């Protein structure tokens, strides 16, 4: 049996190994995976929805993130933990947001407060985006810096994940409502680096039953 995920407070990673090439080493970037939504437009728990292979939406979204990021902190809520939605997150820390009903901003702020001290950048990932390419994630990480906000763009449209340098962690802790980090991005436009990507997956979140069905139909055509 796989190790069960455990809700906990994030702890600082142990040890700070000196960089071998200080001027070229990328900053340590972890992922905050926001998975505490109420799926109001979906009319049910979308993260528990099963895809064609029998695994749920959360698991598929986590796979891409986990294939690239060594450090992942999941922001969830107690009801979904009890339903087993996060069962595939074995070995990862899950922070339960008691104020998740207040919107994505609340969960983002909750996660930002728990960022370990040794993270220099944090990628804000959404748990309803199963089509993200690991290559795209790696492309964004390579551009991350402590004083930058990395914003992926596909066909002139901004998407996720957005990577924030440590300089903006305090601002993320003040996020509220359903707008997420939009205000932080708007306030710090001079720090935003827009990265054009070929990956439509940065825009394809699953918000309702129709978008889920389109994903299922596309998967069947590829199989």
Image: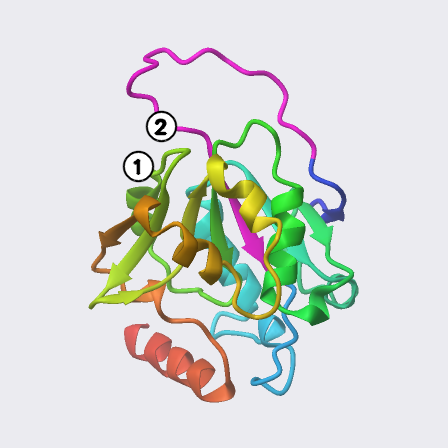
Asked whether residue 26 is drawn in magenta, I would say yes
What label does residue 142 carry, if any?
Answer: 1
Residue 217 is situated, as x and y percent measured from the top left of the image, at 37, 83
Question: Which residues are the magenta region?
Answer: 11-35
| Quarter-of-image position of residue 48 | bottom right
Q: Is residue 171 above or below residue 99?
A: above
Residue at point 46% right, 50% down? 65
Quick check: is 189 in the magenta stretch? no
Query: Which mark, by number, is residue 26?
Result: 2
Q: Where residue 6 sits in the image (x, y, percent)?
A: 75, 47
Q: Residues within 10 Å of mark 2 (few under 14, many from 20)?
A: some
* Quadrant of the image occupied by residue 56: bottom right
Asked if 39 appears above or below 26 in the picture, the reply is: below
Comparing 170 with 115, the one in front is: 170
Marks 1 and 2 in Cβ contact (< 8 Å): yes
How many tags in the picture? 2
In what element is the residue under mark 1? loop
């Amino acid at each position: 049996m796989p190790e069960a995920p455990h809700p906990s407070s994030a702890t600082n990673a142990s040890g700070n190994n000196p960089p071998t090439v200080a001027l070229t080493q990328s900053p340590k970037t972890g992922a905050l995976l926001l998975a505490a939504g109420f799926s109001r437009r979906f009319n049910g728990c979308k993260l528990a929805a099963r895809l064609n292979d029998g695994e749920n939406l959360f698991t598929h979204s986590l796979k891409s993130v986990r294939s690239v990021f060594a450090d992942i902190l999941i922001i969830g809520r107690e009801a979904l933990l009890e339903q087993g939605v996060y069962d595939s997150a074995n070995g990862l820390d899950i922070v339960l947001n008691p104020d998740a009903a207040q919107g994505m901003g609340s969960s983002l702020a909750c996660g930002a407060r728990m960022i370990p001290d040794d993270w220099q950048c944090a990628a804000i990932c959404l748990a309803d985006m199963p089509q993200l390419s690991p290559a795209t994630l790696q492309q964004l990480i390579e551009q991350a810096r402590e004083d930058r906000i990395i914003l992926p763009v596909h066909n002139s449209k901004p998407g996720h994940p957005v990577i924030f340098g440590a300089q903006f962690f305090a601002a993320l802790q003040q996020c509220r409502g359903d707008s997420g980090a939009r205000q932080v991005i708007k306030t710090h436009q001079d720090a935003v680096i827009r990265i054009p990507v070929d990956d439509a997956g940065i825009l394809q979140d699953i918000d309702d039953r129709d978008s889920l069905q389109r994903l299922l139909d596309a998967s069947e055509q590829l199989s």
